[in-house]
Image (cartoon, rainbow, N blue to C red):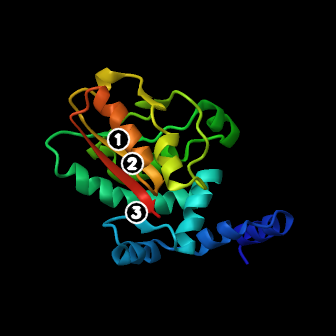
Amino acid sequence: MSLYSFFSTLIDIVAPPRRTENIVRALTLQQLQLLVLRGDRAGSLPYHDKRVTALVWELKYYAHPRAAVLAGAILSEVLIGIASEELGKPVLVPIPIHAARRRQRGHNQTEVLCRAALVHASSFFDYVPYALTRTRATPPQQGLHKHLRLTNIEGSMHAQDPKKIAGRVCVVVDDVSTTGATFAEATRALKKAGAARVECVALAYS
């Protein structure tokens, strides 16, 4: 047993890994790529698959490094495909979270996801992590009925620097999309700021 393996085993004994963390540890990029090929939406993962659920969970709540690497590799393929169709560089925009939730969680998972994807796609985009802000805190979309999801987030986003958005193609990134309400709100805010077009990409769909 190597020294690294010894200490990894010791850490696992002292602080047992989460169930979702164990799933992500065993997950490979090849497995995710197969799920993308078998999925209903081109380039995206099926959230109902337990491996994808674990991947998103570890990214969202723990910013798990391996989850970020795997998710970033999958997302980058879609992003590069979009950017290659454009004459200029699109603006890459992560879905924002409210400041109170960021303080509670310690990170914004869509920013973690974007940074991981840019490892492979940095030359294709202008990354503007704070292009959008949340102007009010909203209850989490998860667990809400469909009609409440559609109205919960309405009017909650604002483009804080329209000069970086005006006339540009914007590609908005989220970890999971269910009803499309979050993307619709981001699109509204970006178009109000003068975006020429808005493309929306989710790592997974449910």
Judged left or right of residue 124, residue 132 is right
In the image as oriented, which residue stretches furthest toward the right?
A: 14
The residue that appears at 70% across and 39% down in the rendered structure is 104
Are circles 1 and 2 on residues that touch, CB within 8 Å? yes
Looking at numbered disc 3 in the image, what kind of residue is underneath it?
Answer: Ile
Determine which quarter of the picture holds residue 195. top left
- Find disc 2 in the rendering and name its residue: 118
Picture coordinates of residue 180, whole percent (x, y): 40, 51
Looking at numbered disc 1 in the image, what kind of residue is underneath it?
Answer: Leu
Q: Is residue 93 visible?
A: no
Q: Which mark is residue 92?
A: 1
Compute the Cα span from label 1 to label 2.
Answer: 9 Å
Picture coordinates of residue 60, whole percent (x, y): 59, 52
Q: Looking at the image, which is closer to me, 204 or 124?
A: 204
Q: Secondary structure at mark 1?
A: strand
Q: Looking at the image, which is closer to me, 62 or 96?
A: 96
Q: Secondary structure at mark 3?
A: helix
For marks 3 and 1 on the same chain, the one whose residue lies earlier in the sequence: 3
Judged left or right of residue 159, residue 84 is left
**Pointer 3: residues within 10 angstroms few (<14), some, or many (20+)?**
many
Looking at numbered disc 2 in the image, what kind of residue is underneath it?
Answer: Leu
The vertical placement of 102 against 37, above or below, is: above
Q: Tell me the quadrant of the picture where the N terminus can be found.
A: bottom right
The vertical placement of 146 against 53, above or below, is: above
The residue that appears at 65% across and 32% down in the rendered structure is 100
Q: Secondary structure at mark 2?
A: helix
Picture coordinates of residue 21, whole percent (x, y): 66, 66
Are circles 3 and 1 on residues that touch, CB within 8 Å? no
- Give the number of the mark in front: 2 or 3: 3
- Find disc 3 in the rendering and name its residue: 74
